[in-house]
């Protein structure tokens, strides 16, 4: 498998400050040809763009994570729009709602979420959606708003069948991360067969959610190979064929500039 794509990582985070070049070399050796780095606030989004300029294998997404919605400085939307128009920015996000930690007030999360959706429509780039313990409100907002075409991806999906069907009905791609490798993730592996093959993406969410073999360690893009292998096994597919399909899906959603 030499065309692997990690469709969601956070290589701008401090966990990679000392060894990013080595992390990317390990990814290359594992067959990873592209990483989409998702911003979580203005500083992170700017850093994502900078990384995408410095490292050809990295593309950027820019956005405000729901945790940081209340901390978004005045004028954040104008600044985010400026970043969103950069040629290496292929998506808007990570955005959405998180009612598990509630680090920002819910009304503030919703306001920032809606404004980012409208920005994505304006710049014609897909959404990267984060939703944790907030499914009903996430779907209410997505159904209320005009969406880009294609709309985007449900990042690190871990919901049930009805959530999956609702996401697919809206046109979203579904991204699966390291938890699919965990011994007790039977329900998530069972859901794989209901994801159309042309809507499936795979990711690390590095530095979080390391696959089982590295579960107590920092995650990194090279480890996405283990997620590909476990998903291929669950679907009874050849890993190389799965990798080719995910490659096609990723460039269809994010554009072929992802693998320039």
Image: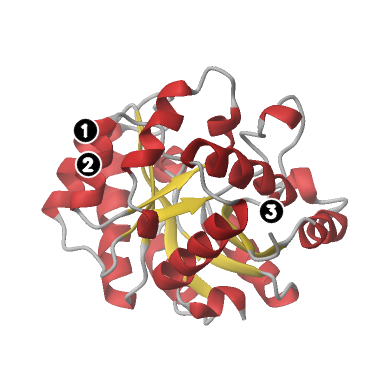
* 27 over 150 or under it: above or below: above
In the shown orientation, is residue 111 left or right of residue 176? left
Task: Tell me which label, 3 or 2, sits earlier in the chain.
Answer: 3
Kindly identify which residue carries mark 1: 162
Question: Marks 1 and 3: which is nearer the front?
Answer: 1
Seen at 69% across and 53% down, the residue is: 11
| CA gap, disc 1 and disc 3 | 32 Å
Give the residue at x 61% y 70%: 49
Q: Between disc 1 and disc 3, whose residue precedes?
A: 3
Residue 128 vs residue 163, the one in the foreground: 163
Left/right of residue 206 with respect to residue 76 in the rendered view: right
Q: Residue 155 at what x, y percent from top left?
A: 44, 46
Q: Residue at x 59, y 38 (%)?
A: 230
Q: Position of residue 122 (x, y in %)?
A: 28, 75
Residue at numbered disc 3 = 11
Image quarter where the N terminus lies is bottom right
Mark 1 surroundings within 10 Å by alpha-carbon count, few (fewer than 14), some (14 through 19), many (20 or more): few
Q: Report how far apart the C-alphas of labels 3 and 2 lie in the structure.
A: 31 Å
């Amino acid at each position: 498998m030499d065309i692997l794509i990690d469709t969601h990582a956070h290589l701008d985070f401090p966990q990679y400050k000392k060894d990013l070049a080595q992390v990317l070399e390990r990814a290359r050796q594992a067959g990873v040809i592209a990483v989409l780095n998702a911003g979580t606030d203005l500083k992170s989004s700017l850093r994502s763009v900078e990384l995408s300029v410095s490292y050809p294998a990295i593309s950027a997404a820019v956005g405000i994570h729901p945790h940081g919605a209340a901390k978004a400085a005045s004028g954040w939307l104008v600044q985010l729009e400026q970043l969103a128009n950069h040629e290496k920015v292929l998506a808007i996000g990570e955005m959405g709602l998180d009612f598990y930690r509630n680090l920002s007030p819910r009304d503030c999360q919703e306001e920032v979420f809606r404004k980012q959706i409208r920005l994505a429509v304006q710049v014609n780039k897909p959404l990267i959606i984060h939703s944790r313990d907030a499914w009903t409100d996430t779907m209410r907002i997505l159904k209320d708003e005009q969406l880009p075409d294609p709309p985007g991806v449900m990042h690190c999906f871990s919901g049930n069948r009805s959530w999956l069907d609702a996401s697919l009905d809206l046109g979203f791609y579904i991204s699966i991360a390291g938890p699919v490798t965990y011994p007790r993730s039977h329900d998530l592996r069972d859901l794989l067969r209901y994801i159309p093959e042309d809507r499936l993406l795979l990711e690390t969410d590095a530095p979080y959610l390391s696959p089982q073999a590295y579960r107590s360690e920092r995650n990194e893009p090279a480890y996405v190979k283990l997620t590909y292998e476990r998903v291929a096994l669950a679907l009874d597919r050849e890993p190389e064929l799965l990798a080719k399909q995910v490659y096609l899906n990723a460039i269809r959603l994010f554009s072929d500039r992802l693998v320039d």
